[in-house]
Every structure is written in C-alpha cells, then in structure tokens.
Image (cartoon, grey):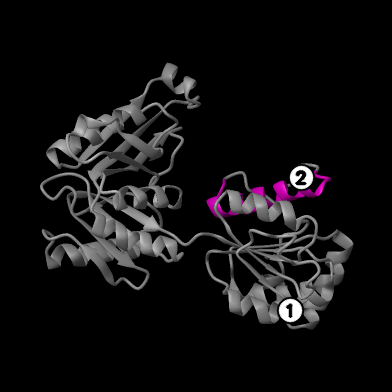
Amino acid sequence: MLDILDMINDWIAADRRVALATVVKTWGSAPRREGSKMGITAQMGPVDAAPPAMIGSVSGGCVEGAVVEEAVAGFRDGAPRLLKFGVADDLAWEVGLTCGGSIEVFVEPLDTIWWDALAELAAGDHFGVTITVVEGELIGEKVLLDARGEVLFQTDNLTGAHLESIKALANSSKKSGLATMGETRVMVDMQVERPHLILIGGVHVAIPLEAMATQVGFRVSIVDPRAAFASRERFPNVAEILHSYPDKALPQLGLDRSTYLAVLTHDPKIDDKALITALPANIPYIGVLSSGRTHRQRVARLKEAGLDDELIARIRTPIGIDIGATTPEEIAVCILAEIIAVRNGARNEVR
C-alpha cells in the first residue's frame, strides 16, 4: 500500500483515470502475497490518448501486461473484474517461479472516496480492513472498517444484513485473502500498521540496521539517554530519537503487536530497563546483543527485578540468525533477517 500511495494520490490530483489491481489468491510459488497492489492510470479523455502507466506489481512480471489491458478495458466499461492466471512451468522459470504458480487478481476502477479513507489510515499507520465482493451481482461493492469496527466507507448496494456479515468476517480474519460470506466470494484486504522497530542504543550496528529496516518498510525509533550516540548526525533519517531511559521512553513510543525491539547497548543500566518494561507487554520480538556469559548475569538481575522464567525465555539472544556475521553491517543483516522471519511466521525461523 505505502509503495504506491503517493503516486496514486498524484494521479488523482492530476485528474487521471486510475484502476487498482489487488492479488486476492495465490497458489504455488506466486511471488506476491495476497493484498499486493498495482495502480494503473491513463489520461482523461479518449482511453487510448496516451499509453497507460503503472506503479507496484501483482506478480514477478508475467501477468502485469494482461492486468494493464484489463484495467484499460475497465476504463471503457466501468466494470470490475476478477482475473485468473495459471503460470506454466517454462514461463514460471523465466520470472523466478521455479515451482510454477497461479494467482487471482481483482481489477477495479478506483473509488477515490474509499481510497482517500484508506490512504488516511495508511499514512497514519492505523489498522483498517476492506471487504470487497469479487464475484456475482454485487461485484465491486465494498466496506472499509477501522480497528474498532467502525464503518469508514461503504458502497450503496449493501444491506444491513450484508454489513453484519462483513463485520463478523472482519473480526474473524487474521490476514488478507479470499473468503466466503455465505455463498459470496469476497476479498479481505487488511491495511496493517507499519512494523515499528525500536533500537535501544545508538551504537555502531544500529546505523546499518536502521537504514536496512527503513528500506524494507519499518518505522524506526532510537532510544538512548546518551545524546552523543543517538544524534541526527548519526541517524539523519530515523523517525524518532528519544534521549531518555527505556522505562520512560518505551511507554511514550507504545508497545503493541507491531513493535519489534532490538536491545544493543551492552549497558545493564539501559538494557535492563528496556527488558523489564518490554517483556510484560508481549510484543512479537525482543532481541538482545550479548554473549552467553553476559546473558546469564542478565537473567539473574531480571529475576531479582521480579520477572519470571516464562517472560525471560522470550528474549532472543544472541540476537539474529547465525550467518557467521562479523562486521556491523553483517550483524545488522542477521538481526533484520530474524525480525522479518518472526514477522512473517517463516517456517524455517528457528532458535
């Protein structure tokens, strides 16, 4: 969503036709997950007045051309459509799908009122879920709900009964993808908060780690009471820098399902406060840069502070996936790889 947000907003502001293509289902080795989006635009006036442009992608390149053609056809007839593509083995190999794959893509003329509401959620890092009918008489009808289940947008042809079913489906869904509502196929499309990586300590490894994490879509904050370590000169692009101890800073930043914590200072006065504050919050990831001996000493201190074995066991240390890293840049790679593996529920994510 964020990768296409600004460009689509620019197209809308320029009064261009815009269509949106969304991956609704994948099989096999399709490279883009459910919910991935591509925007397509053409100049106002005759559809063929200028070649269409696109932003984002719905595959490794093998079906984009066909999707653009269907989007242009949608500019003519105003109708949404559900496209189904099977990727043959030879073509799959060319685009990196070594096991083949199939995808379904929903293409629709962009409803700018819905888009504006969704874009506001995305820009503010707020959760929302859109339920869109992708087949049948109500194809294209949709509802946007916020994290509290409040309706932010709904199309005209959905009844109260539809809305109740949609709310129930939104509450029970865990991820984006196709679902059924009675006998109707719908797309559950979740706009989730950007993952928030909090770095405890503006140490050397934090510099490449912040840069890499930002590049792959994380919002990054740094907590370090030592202003010389956590400065704008060292971290010019970081979202937030807090020059206070973690027990004060972490509640300000917020600890929730989208928070990932990397504790990096090697200073117990700083690191222990971060762990005592964060471990009870049940965030998805807490990693600590340390040796085994240092961690055994840390465990003793945390127990003295009142943390039980179950909470302490959630600490991941030595931090990161073991790739034999030695330089700060390599260590940053192994830390970020572990965080991404945890975030995506990777099957090979082991400790």
For label 2, the residue is: 330
One can see residue 255 in this view? yes
User: Most prominent secondary structure in the magenta stretch?
Assistant: helix
Residue 317, how many percent across, how many down? 76, 59
213 or 233: nearer the viewer? 233
Residue 183 vertical position relative to residue 38 in the rendered view, above or below:
below
Task: Please tell me which residue is depicted at 27% across the width and 44% down the height of the picture.
Answer: 18
For label 1, the residue is: 245
Q: Which residue ends up furthest to the top in the rendered image?
A: 90
225 or 182: nearer the viewer? 225
One can see residue 308 in this view? no
Q: Which residue ends up furthest to the right in the rendered image?
A: 293
Task: Please tell me which residue is depicted at 19% across the width and 65% down the height of the picture.
Answer: 163
Residue 293, how many percent across, how many down? 89, 63
85 or 66: nearer the viewer? 66
Task: Please tell me which residue is depicted at 82% across the width and 60% down the height of the picture.
Answer: 290
* Crowd class of label 1 (few under 14; some 14 to 19; many from 20; radius 10 Å): some
**Membership of 309 in magenta stretch:** no
Residue 43, how many percent across, how many down? 25, 39
Mark 1 secondary-structure assignment: loop
| Direction from residue 176 to residue 199 in the image, left or right | right
Q: Earlier in the sequence, mark 1 or mark 2?
A: 1
The amino acid pointed to by label 1 is Tyr
Q: What residue range appears in magenta?
A: 325-346
| Direction from residue 130 to residue 203 in the image, left or right | right
